[in-house]
Image: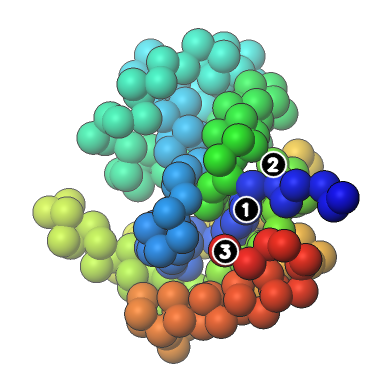
Amino acid sequence: MSAPAAPLVIAIDGPAAAGKGTLARRLAAHLGLPYLDTGLLYRAVGRRVLDAGGDPADAAVATAAALALPPADMDRADLRTPEAALAASAVAAVPGVRAALLEFQRSFGRTRGAVLDGRDIGTVVFPEAQVKFFVTASAEARAKRRWLELQAAGTPLPLAQVEAETRRRDEQDAARATAPMKPAPDAVLLDTTALDAEAAFAAAIAQLRARLAAIPGAAP
Ligand code: CDP
């Protein structure tokens, strides 16, 4: 008798504004899987530290905020701001913060399967995920997308500022010692520079089918 197939986990990692969230949401809806935007966890921790007047890079302060994070904070309306993004990147470099948030992410996907997006899903949170994507796009394309998102949200910023902040965050995320942003060795690389959301989804579905076809009993 063969062992029961593990629930399907899809890991989506990559730099800022590469299109991870849009792709992850669409894949989750298509496959009927729960979706977790893990960046929101780090944004919520960063926001808490800023609210208290603390320094997001202070390891003790950031770790205490992560350990005490109320789940309702994930629903705050002010997590998508550039200020929250930079604070998130600072707290995300603190090993105690990452450790405090790890079990929540793992238990989210363990029972029913899930699509999770972030920076270390395929490398640290779910190294056993059946399908992993590392979604990228040129720095210019990503900054332009975030710039348009901010405009649509009614909080416009100069493109040069968005570009500089995106670059700074990517450098910080890739250079940190704990769980740096990098493709898992078995990740599918998906460059969305020339792809709209529809084309990125189609490319991901084709890769997903190919991956799952190679795993006995895993086809959805
Ligand atoms: O939406 P965007 O790609 O700009 O960022 P996000 O996914 O919301 O993540 C915000 C920040 O949280 C990132 O810059 C990382 O520093 C951190 N993060 C992380 O370290 N690990 C994750 N799994 C998810 C986010």
Tell me the element at label 3: loop
**Side of 193 relative to 145 (left or right):** right
Circle on res. 125: 2
Residue farthest along the left direction in this orientation: 154
Q: Which residue lies at the image location 33% right of the left edge and 63% below the top edge?
A: 146
Indicate the secondary structure of the residue bearing disc 1.
loop
Q: Nearer the viewer, residue 47 or 114?
A: 114
Distance between the alpha carbons at the discs numbered 3 and 1: 8 Å
Taking the spot 28% from the left edge, 65% from the top edge, the residue there is 147
Image quarter of residue 178: top right
Q: Please, what is the three-letter code of the amino acid marked with disc 3? A: Pro
Residue 1 is situated, as x and y percent measured from the top left of the image, at 87, 50
Residue under numbered circle 3: 220
Image vertical order of residue 27 relative to residue 54, above or below: below
Q: Is residue 127 visible?
A: no
Farthest residue to the bottom: give it. 194
The residue carrying mark 1 is: 8
Find out whether the residues at labels 3 and 1 contact each other: C-beta distance under 8 Å. Answer: yes
Q: Nearer the viewer, mark 3 or mark 1?
A: 3
Q: Is mark 3 within 8 Å of ligand 1?
A: no
Mark-to-mark CA distance, 3 and 2: 22 Å
Point out residue 153 in the picture as x, y percentages from the top left corner: 17, 54
Going from the N terminus, do you reach mark 3 or mark 2 first? 2
- Extreme residue toward the right, this view: 1
Q: Nearer the viewer, residue 43 or 53?
A: 43
Q: Say what amino acid the circle numbered 2 marks.
A: Val
Q: Residues within 10 Å of mark 3 (few under 14, many from 20)?
A: few
> In which quadrant of the rendered image does the C terminus lie?
bottom right
